[in-house]
Image (spheres, grey):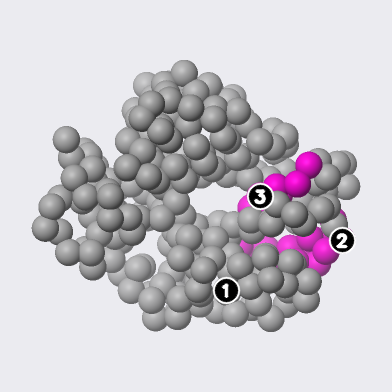
Amino acid sequence: MALLVGTSGWQYRDWRGVLYPDGLPQRSWLERYGECFSTVENNNAFYRLPARETFEKWRDQTPGRFVMAVKASRFLTHIKRLKDPEEPVERLLEAAKGLGDKLGPILLQIPPNLQADPPRLARCLSCFPEAIRVTVEPRHDSWWTDETRDVLERHSAALCWADRLGRPLTPQWRTAPWVYVRFHEGAARPWPMYGDQALRSWVRRLADTLAGGGDGYVYFNNDPGGAAVRNAFRFIELADADGMVPVRTRGCRQNP
């Protein structure tokens, strides 16, 4: 079992003084981030797919055990709405493979107004090679059916477990040998922090789920004010105390 904890993105100016020392140039932020966390969810690819050379540069800037999850382009998920996925998936993978063995799961975040279409999802998932881990984050309640679950299980794609305000937004289906969790907004203060009670409940849930083996990927998307950084550090502490031993790189502490 490997538990990897990080944040959704790393290029946030208000993280100065929280994760990035004052005066550290932006070109060095990923290297600094990699000293503290074992993984990051790359959201840049959602808005504009970077060139393969950019992924190669990120590969070279991060430590050996680092893993980068990649959020699939909105062209595939929000413009094409998963239709005719072959070319967009091929283009995404051709670029992202610049990460080499640091390529983690691909996140397919489905638009909130896209109602369930399991055959369309199945066609999209079939475009990914078996070696590529894919997680799917549906955001319309019509997806919570046995047919959806069956599609995910047949393709070994993980249902993304999403949380907002300390409450799960999705069923707790385990549809792959690994799990993927996204924290969008906490209910603690200052906003959008998560409190210890919510974090501990998720640590226990993951400990129970992964007791028999498998990897867990955990990302905090509540980035304003550095909340994601603080919550990721705290989640690692709580998971460590629970005996889960999160994967670490070099180790660091957040700035005061």
Depth check, mark 1 against mark 2: the one in front is 2
The residue at 88%/47% (across/down) is 147
Q: Residues within 10 Å of mark 3 (few under 14, many from 20)?
A: many
- Residue under numbered circle 2: 119
Residue 123 position (above or below residue 193): below
Which sits earlier in the primary sequence, circle 1 or circle 3?
1
Reading the image, the residue beneath label 1 is: 93
Q: Residue at x 16, y 35 (%)?
A: 256
Label 1: element kind: helix
Mark 3 or 2, nearer chain start? 2
Q: Position of residue 246 (x, y in %)?
A: 40, 36
Q: Which residue is mark 3?
A: 137
Instruction: Answer few, some or many: residues within 10 Å of disc 2's Cα (few below 14, many 20 plus, some between 14 and 19).
Output: few
In the rendered structure, which segment of residues is drawn in magenta? 118-141
Q: Amino acid at mark 1?
A: Leu
Amino acid carrying label 3: it is Glu
Left or right position of 67 against 119: left
Outermost residue on the top side: it is: 197
Q: Residue 63: image x %, image y %?
A: 29, 58
Q: Residue furthest left?
A: 23
* Alpha carbons under labels 3 and 2: distance apart: 16 Å
Residue drawn at x 44%, y 42% as measured from the top left: 222
Amino acid type shown at disc 2: Pro
Residue 143 versus residue 250: which sits nearer the camera? 143
Residue 225 is inside the magenta segment: no
Looking at the image, residue 47 lies above or below residue 136:
below
- Label 1 close to label 2 by CB (< 8 Å): no
- Frontmost residue, 211 versus 39: 39
Query: Front-most of 244 and 106?
Result: 106
